[in-house]
Amino acid sequence: MTAATLITPGSDREQIVEGDNPLGLEGIEFIEYATAKPQALGQVLETMGFKPVARHRSREVLLYRQGGLNIIVNAHAKGSPLSDKPLISAMALRVRDAATAYRRALDRGAWGVPTHVEVMELNIPAIHGVGTSRIYFVDRHQQFSIYDVDFTPIPGVDQHPPATAGLHFFGIVQYIGNDRSEDWTEFYRELLGFQPLPPEQRFGILPKGCILRSPCPSASRFYIQLIEPEAGVLDVEDDEGLHRMGLGSADVLATVAELSRRGVEFVSSISVQTSERGALSKTWLGSVSFEIVHDVRG
Amino acid sequence: MNSANMNDFSMDSRSLAGALSAKLKAVREAGFSQITLCAEDLVGHPDGVDAAVASVQASGLAVTGFQATCDFEGQSGPLHAFKLDLAQAMLCLCQALRCPLLVLPASRLPSDTDDAHAVVRGLRQLAMLAIPLNIKIAYQGWAGGARVQTYLQAWDRVCDADMPNLGLSLDGQEVLAANTPQDDLLADLEMLDPDRIFLVQLTDLLTHAGQPLRVLPGDGAHHEALAVLVTSLHGLGYRGSYNLAAFNADYAAMPAQHVAQRARGSALWLGQDVLQRSVPLPNQIRLRRSLTV
């Protein structure tokens, strides 16, 4: 057992191991989309209750926010042209010490991502994730934020707009190839300390696949859901990538009602129906959808 | 004779003389659908690696495995950092070829650390690097390995490393050279998980001046032992590819087409006579493993 292992009170009687949190993971700092159509994605985000609050100092990058949710829309092409279809290109994790987290990940077999910072910008360490995505490590989220350095606030805009109907970050859905659940479970377990949940523990209305729980404190805990292709007869090559965000809500039906008033449409089909457990938005721009999941945060 | 019986067999490029394009042509014309390549095939291409990769893809051959002799595992400090960079380059080449398997022969270098776990830690690191690329690692014990010289030793390290995409490459030469009694061989093979045997390298042996000479199955003196090995693996549930990996100075002096045709004879013997494969129907489809179990 490592020093980072959490043991619940009562350990004088029995040791109940809650799991390691080797990086001191404390939640999600931001999710980043890459797109050649940042304004179209921005409209989608605003429909979902996000507000544009800041622009990047040197690149075509916008920060959207509601409550504790930060989304970065990146239209700054790095070499190859961006797709019109928005793609979740990164997730940034809050950790105890970003440099230590980065070195630890490299020691265990992560691919480091070379950074290209401009003058006076932060060097945020990152490793390669699924597909072309990145996983950033951020440790400046308490005294001051990374946005204070790299972004310029949009004048006259509330920098901390409240969350729509108490929405908070719940998780992210990752599409993976056939027979790849074990690989990705090990990836997130070894590098970041995630633990797979038993198959009977499921959230929301889309229970398929393997769910990994982050080792964060309960107030900032989030999940990664790994989904293999539908069982079919053909053994085909599969693209892998981050597919959609999951947003937590203490009252799914109230949240759906509020978002519907804002113009969000939800999937209603034989297999997917809005309920107290969750809901799924229709897909915008060919690739963007949001899942609402019942989740009460203290 | 139908080439569909050859679908389980790949031809090792090291068995063939000449440039990459000549090797690809010879393998294709001999009726193979798979080939196993090594870094030298790509970096030695006169027009560069990208052109080499393009020619492989244009050949229509699937790349079953990519041999990465990089003496990776078991080092520390700057040497490990150097080898890590090399291993990453190998993985990138493997990915460029759309090859699902990197074959890692055990390192020839004695470990430069007293840490008994250095080999296992290195294997875990390499397997982890391979996960985002959707590549499996097949670790292979061999006589030239400094610490790991047999498939059973390699299997122990694979089990210790315990990574889902790390398995074994089993070299038939080791089995033939050891001349293990059949019952003992079967007992040894039963220790392996057939799902974690990612590749079987097949060769026959001739003895020349006391030294084993790797030749194609059927060209050597160990027909029966080879047949026992293949049928035993099949009986244990191995359903992966067999790589025909025979290389010697004589093959290197022959035209690639000639050696590839001899390899075709090896594949047909193993497929039809030893494994007694039926010829698949035209337009066959592969069922996913989860549906066929």
Image (cartoon, rainbow, N blue to C red):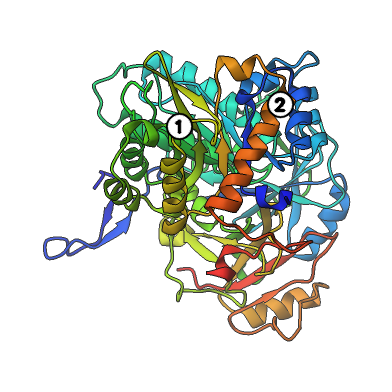
- In the image, is A154 to the left or to the right of B91? right
For mark 2, name the chain: B
The quarter of the picture where residue A8 lies is bottom left
Q: Amino acid at mark 1?
A: Ala
Q: Quadrant of residue B278?
A: bottom right
Structural crowding at the residue carrying mark 2, measured as other residues with C-alpha within 10 Å and reported as few (<14), some (14–19) or many (≥20): some
According to the picture, the residue beneath numbered tag 1 turns out to be B221
Q: Is residue B63 left or right of residue A249?
A: right
Q: Which residue is mark 2?
A: B258
- Tell me if residue B266 comes above or below residue B8 in the rendering: above
Q: Is residue A150 visible?
A: no
Q: Is residue A139 above or below residue B23?
A: below
Horizontal and vertical percent position of residue A294: 56, 75
Neighbourhood count class around disc 1 (C-alpha, 10 Å): few under 14, some 14–19, many 20 upward: some
Report the disc number at residue A78: none
- Look at the numbered discs 2 and 1 and tell me whether their residues touch, using CB distance below 8 Å: no
Q: Position of residue B221 (x, y in %)?
A: 45, 32
Q: Position of residue B127 (x, y in %)?
A: 48, 39
Taking depth in this image into account, of B144 and A259 the one nearest to the observer is: B144
- What amino acid is at disc 2? His
Residue at 80 percent across and 77 percent down: it is A261
